[in-house]
Image (tube, rainbow, N blue to C red):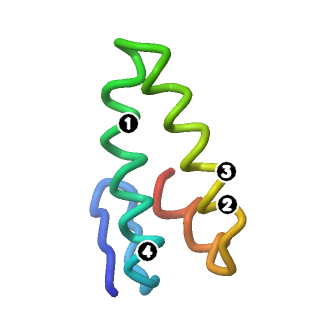
Amino acid sequence: MRLMRPGSFFDGEMSPDVAGGVAILFVLTRFAEHSPTFTEKYRQIYEYIGSHPETQKIHPAID
């Protein structure tokens, strides 16, 4: 799956599950400032996808 993020100049291929995790991290980032629950969920998902074989693609996509 191709994921592009013009603001960060990211343009790369990743599996759908990692792309979904990246999308969820974007959403949780927006809500994390309003609730510690969202901050904790962000941390949990970040840890989960951080253990994925494609983890090297995650950091450039979310920066």
Q: Which mark is residue 48?
A: none
Q: Nearer the viewer, residue 27 or 5?
A: 27
Tell whether 36 sits left or right of 7. right
Tag 1: amino acid: Leu
Badge 1: how crowded within 10 Å, few (<14), some, or many (20+)? many
Lower position in the chain sequence, tag 4 or tag 2: 4
Identify which amino acid the numbered label 3 is placed on: Glu
Which residue has dot 1 on it? 28
In this view of the protein, which residue sits in the foreground, 35 or 59? 35
- Identify residue type, mark 4: Asp
Q: Are marks 3 and 2 in contact (CB under 8 Å)?
A: yes
User: The disc labelled 2 sits on which kind of residue?
Assistant: Gly
CB-based contact (under 8 Å), mark 4 and mark 2: no
**Label 4, label 2: how far apart the Cα atoms are:** 12 Å
Q: Position of residue 32 (x, y in %)?
A: 41, 23
Q: What residue is pinned by disc 2? A: 50
**Residue carrying label 4:** 17
Q: CA distance from mark 3 to mark 4?
A: 14 Å
Quadrant position of residue 51: bottom right
Q: Secondary structure at mark 1?
A: helix
**Whole-number angstrom distance, CA of label 1 to CA of label 3:** 14 Å
